[in-house]
Image (cartoon, rainbow, N blue to C red):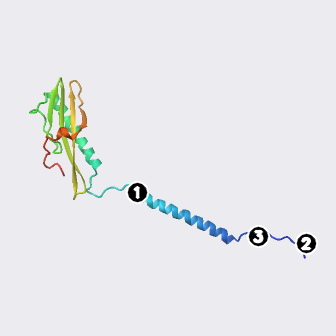
């Protein structure tokens, strides 16, 4: 017996350590790939060509309302607005307007029309706007109002492109 012999400490083989690192690395990589795929799937995609979103249709109707309100303001500078002197909407998406005047303030109510969806299946949408033109103020105030105020107005033909 060797009394001076030292027994070496038992260390795990290097292969075991490499296997643990490989398993953990594979697991982390798998989680990263799944997360990446989920992000790609949930990322917003642009609609197919020819498709209009409801948000885009609403924005277009609001732009049409402001353009017509500006035309009303220009017409009001030259003459008082009455049912016979109202400017004809230059845009077919603007419905027939009605006008009311009280104490120097003219209120014109009109509808705007658009459609959204794919080129094969369009969904029509209508909004009602009120343009208020006040004496001494050049710019009109335009607000969207409840559709009940516009119900009596006819929807123009060729509204839904």
What is the distance, in whole Å, between disc 3 and disc 1 at their CAs? Answer: 51 Å
**What secondary structure is found at the residue carrying circle 3?**
loop
Residue 16 in the image: state x and y as whole percent: 66, 70
Residue in front for this viewpoint, 68 or 127: 127
**What secondary structure is found at the residue carrying circle 2?**
loop
From the image, tell me which residue sits under label 1: 42
Mark 2 crowdedness (10 Å alpha carbons): few <14, some 14-19, many ≥20: few
Residue 70 in the image: state x and y as whole percent: 21, 35
What is the distance, in whole Å, between disc 3 and disc 2 at their CAs? Answer: 20 Å
Report whether 40 appears left or right of 143: right
Q: Which mark is residue 3?
A: 2
Residue found at x 23% / y 43%: 61
Q: Quadrant of residue 143?
A: top left
Residue found at x 52% / y 64%: 30
Q: Is residue 88 above or below residue 17?
A: above
Q: Which mark is residue 10?
A: 3
What is the distance, in whole Å, between disc 1 and disc 2 at their CAs? Answer: 71 Å
Residue in front for this viewpoint, 105 or 88: 105
Q: Quadrant of residue 140?
A: top left
In the rendered view of the protein, which quadrant contains the N terminus?
bottom right
Residue found at x 10% / y 33%: 83
């Amino acid at each position: 017996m060797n009394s001076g012999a030292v027994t070496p400490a038992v260390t795990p083989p290097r292969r075991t350590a490499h296997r643990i690192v490989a398993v953990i690395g594979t697991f982390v990589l798998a989680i990263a790939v799944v997360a990446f795929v989920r992000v790609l799937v949930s990322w917003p995609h642009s609609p197919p060509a020819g498709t209009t979103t409801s948000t885009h249709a609403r924005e277009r109707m609001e732009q049409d309302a402001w353009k017509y309100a500006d035309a009303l303001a220009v017409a009001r500078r030259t003459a008082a607005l009455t049912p016979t002197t109202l400017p004809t909407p230059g845009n077919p998406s603007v419905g027939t307007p009605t006008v009311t005047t009280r104490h120097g303030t003219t209120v014109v109510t009109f509808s705007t029309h658009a459609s959204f969806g794919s080129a094969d299946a369009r969904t029509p949408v209508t909004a009602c706007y009120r343009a208020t033109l006040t004496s001494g103020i050049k710019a009109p105030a335009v607000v969207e109002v409840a559709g009940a105020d516009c119900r009596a107005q006819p929807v123009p033909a060729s509204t839904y492109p």
